[in-house]
């Protein structure tokens, strides 16, 4: 918190240090400072986080900001006209954190919408809206929330986000791949080369300035801003926020190099990149100070409880995972798949998860995570001689997957929510011939281009994996409609992402009935 006197002093210093950002008419900024929008996240029953970042020239170094702290006023109101202010204050936007602001608002009423906004240098931000949660344990009959992720700027427009913004939702879970860390000269979404729909402002990302540039370009998209200013987000990350298929301190995207190639980046070099990438992720996500990176690590796993209806565990499947077996990729199983010492969550997170699952108190147990838990045969041609696994998924780690499924067998109403695959599908989680849960895998917002209703070989893929109930290769998001009697997941798809405006439709609905594990299609 800062005083008005400190604000005036800071403004004077700003003018001396960087006169280029001063407007001729006397305002503090030459351009609109809230160009990256506003967002809310990590809701609880008495509040949420509100976020913005000052960036009057978002693609310039430091977002066009001076290297000095700048005070930002914030307000939260009961009404969209801000006639009834219920909370307000001043927060410093610090250059060390890219002039981002994370305000943890508390003391609000449960289970209702609020509106928020920011002011800096005489400029006012876009208005945001977010809901608080019901009190933990309070009786709740219904919940509706969104699930999305995987948005490649070059592969398509983000029109799906504008549709998501129009949904009536309690919150949105984002499973990661908020940015992609590389630029492409050609796309091959249909097997033939084509130019990207729009171009990244970079080739590859290496340091903090590069990653900030990537987020700034991404957040300039108004469809993305529409979704973030309308719903509170539960933000996670997967691999592309840092480097494709990374785990722990290992860079697995070696541009065709062999695993033991001396040119592959060693862990201590990769961790420098990870530290920069995670800081940039924090600077642009509406998350709590508890997620401020420390030594290149962030405490990503956390729990959300929605009254007595749902307990959701947000998992981290990257930071504590052991290296992928068999040099990664889509391959037949090798002995490393069955390594008893392999880890996906790491011991501390696995213990934390077991404690939370054992607490009970909710009708539904949801696991929100990044990579597919079903061990699927990835052959699209049954004539291929051996079962193919996605070794970057839980299928490459049979020992921890076995422990996870065994734990689910002792619970009721387990639903797993997953991303990463750039396609929609869902199916049963099976442990020793017993169905112990259902998994819904969501498609991408844009990654993979327009797609089609089915990928080539999807019918054969479904036949090879009887636990699968549905497969689809369009872009979009999922909406989870949760009640006492059943959990319904709607697969919402758009017809195109190669055009700025598209048409939304409900492609399918998967249902899990209370007390009956597994998915049926409505």
Image (cartoon, rainbow, N blue to C red):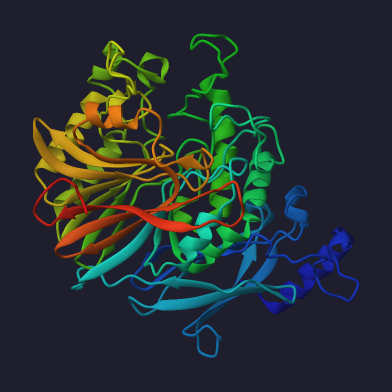
Indicate whether 116 appears above or below 476: below
Q: Nearer the viewer, residue 340 or 190?
A: 190
Which residue is rendered at x = 44% and y = 59% of the image?
233
Q: Residue furthest right?
A: 24
Q: Can residue 72 be seen in this snapshot?
A: yes
In x, y percent, where is residue 138? Answer: 20, 73
Q: Farthest residue toward the bottom?
A: 83
Vertical placement of residue 362 versus 237, above or below: below
Image quarter hosting the N terminus: bottom right
For the point 54% across and 90% down, the residue is: 83
- Between 209 and 296, which is closer to the camera in this rendering? 209
Between 70 and 519, the residue placed more toward the observer is 519
Q: Answer left or right for 14 relative to 271.
A: right
- Against 211, residue 461 (above or below) is above
Total residue callouts:
0
The percent position of residue 87, horizontal first and vertical second, equals 50, 80
**In which quadrant of the rendered view does residue 443 lie?**
top left
Q: Quadrant of the C terminus?
A: bottom left
Which percent across, then down, holds residue 378? 32, 25
Residue 484 point in image, percent of width and height? 16, 65
Kindly tell me whether residue 362 is visible in this rendering: no
418 above or below 164? above
Q: Quadrant of residue 153?
A: top right
């Amino acid at each position: 918190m800062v005083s008005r006197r400190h604000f005036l002093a800071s403004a004077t210093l700003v003018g001396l240090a960087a006169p280029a950002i001063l407007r001729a008419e006397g305002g503090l900024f030459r351009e609109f400072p809230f160009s990256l929008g506003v967002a809310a996240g990590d809701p609880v029953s008495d509040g949420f986080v509100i976020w913005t970042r000052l960036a009057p020239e978002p693609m310039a170094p430091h977002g066009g900001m001076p290297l000095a702290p700048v005070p930002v006023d914030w307000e939260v109101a009961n009404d969209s006209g801000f006639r009834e202010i219920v909370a307000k204050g001043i927060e410093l936007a610090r250059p060390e954190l890219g002039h981002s602001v994370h305000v943890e608002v508390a003391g609000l009423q449960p289970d209702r919408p609020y509106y928020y906004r920011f002011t800096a240098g005489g400029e006012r931000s876009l208005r945001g809206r977010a809901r608080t949660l019901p009190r933990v344990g309070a009786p709740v009959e219904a919940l509706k929330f969104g699930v999305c992720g995987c948005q490649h700027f070059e592969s398509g427009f983000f029109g799906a986000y504008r549709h998501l913004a129009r949904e009536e939702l309690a919150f949105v879970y984002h499973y990661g791949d908020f940015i992609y860390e590389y630029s492409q000269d050609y796309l091959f979404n249909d097997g033939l080369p084509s130019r990207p729909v729009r171009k990244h402002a970079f080739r590859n990302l290496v340091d903090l300035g590069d990653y900030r540039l990537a987020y700034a370009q991404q957040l300039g998209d108004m469809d993305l801003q529409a979704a973030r200013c309308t719903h509170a987000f539960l933000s996670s990350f997967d691999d592309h926020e840092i480097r494709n298929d990374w785990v722990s301190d290992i860079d697995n995207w070696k541009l065709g190099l062999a695993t033991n190639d001396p040119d592959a980046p060693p862990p201590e070099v990769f961790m420098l990149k990870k530290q920069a990438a995670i800081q940039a992720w924090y600077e642009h996500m509406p998350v709590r100070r508890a997620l401020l990176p420390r030594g290149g690590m962030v405490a990503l796993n956390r729990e959300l409880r929605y009254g007595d209806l749902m307990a959701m565990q947000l998992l981290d499947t990257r930071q504590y995972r052991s290296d992928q077996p068999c040099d990664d990729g889509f391959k037949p199983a090798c002995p490393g798949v069955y390594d008893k010492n392999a880890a996906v969550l790491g011991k501390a997170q696995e213990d934390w998860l077991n404690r939370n699952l054992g607490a009970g108190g909710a009708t539904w147990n949801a696991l929100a995570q990044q990579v597919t838990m079903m061990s699927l045969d990835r052959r699209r041609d049954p004539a291929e001689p051996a079962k193919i696994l996605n070794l970057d998924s839980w299928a490459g780690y049979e020992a921890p997957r076995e422990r996870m499924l065994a734990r689910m067998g002792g619970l009721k109403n387990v639903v797993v929510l997953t991303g990463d695959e750039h396609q929609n599908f869902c199916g049963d989680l099976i442990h020793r011939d017993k169905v112990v849960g259902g998994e819904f895998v969501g498609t991408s917002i844009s990654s993979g281009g327009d797609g089609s209703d089915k990928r080539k070989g999807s019918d054969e893929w479904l036949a090879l994996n009887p636990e699968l109930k549905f497969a689809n290769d369009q872009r979009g998001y999922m909406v989870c409609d949760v009640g006492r009697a059943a959990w319904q997941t709607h697969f919402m798809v758009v017809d195109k992402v190669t055009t700025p405006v598209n048409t939304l439709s409900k492609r399918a609905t998967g249902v899990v009935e209370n007390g009956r594990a597994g998915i049926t299609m409505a």
